Amino acid sequence: MYGAYEVYTMFEIFIKTHFSGAHHLRDYPGDCEHPHGHNWKVKVTARATGA
């Protein structure tokens, strides 16, 4: 403890990735009724002050 403050060590880990997925909307009056896909970019970060 340093005075009125505590010192914490911060740990951080992350992963960046991408994926594709497809779907269709049944009985939808439009283009989405037919199978189609989307591409996604994802970054997930986990942080902790201890292990």
Image: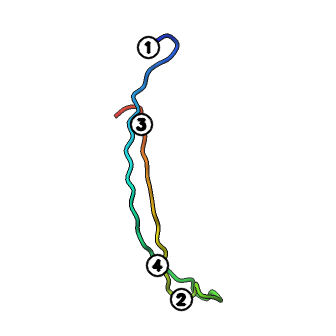
| Quarter location, residue 42 | bottom left
Residue at disc 3, secondary structure: strand
- Which residue bears the numbered disc 1? 1
Residue ID at (38%, 36%): 11
Dot 3 or dot 1, earlier in sequence: 1
Whether tag 3 and tag 2 are in contact, CB under 8 A, the answer is no
* Relative vertical location of residue 39 with respect to residue 31 in this rendering, above or below: above
Point out residue 8 in the picture as x, y percentages from the top left corner.
42, 25
x, y percentage for residue 2? 45, 12
Does 25 appear above or below 51?
below
Q: Name the residue located 53 percent from the left edge and 83 percent from the top edge.
A: 24
Residue type for callout 4: Ala
Distance of label 4 from label 3 (alpha carbons): 35 Å
Looking at this view, is 51 or 43 the one in front? 43
- Give the vertical position of 18 relative to 28 (above or below): above
Residue beneath disc 2: 34
| N-terminal label among 4 and 2 | 4
Q: CA distance from mark 3 to mark 2?
A: 44 Å
Find disc 4 in the rendering and name its residue: 22
Q: Which mark is residue 48?
A: 3
Q: CA distance from mark 4 to mark 2?
A: 10 Å
Q: Amino acid at mark 1?
A: Met
Q: Amino acid at mark 3?
A: Ala
Alpha-carbon span between mark 4 and mark 1? 53 Å
Q: Is residue 47 above or below residue 14?
A: above
- Which sits earlier in the primary sequence, circle 4 or circle 1? 1
Image colouring: rainbow
Q: Position of residue 38 (x, y in %)?
A: 49, 75
Q: Residues within 10 Å of mark 2 (few under 14, many from 20)?
A: few
Q: In the rendered image, which quarter is residue 25 located in? A: bottom right
Q: Secondary structure at mark 1?
A: loop
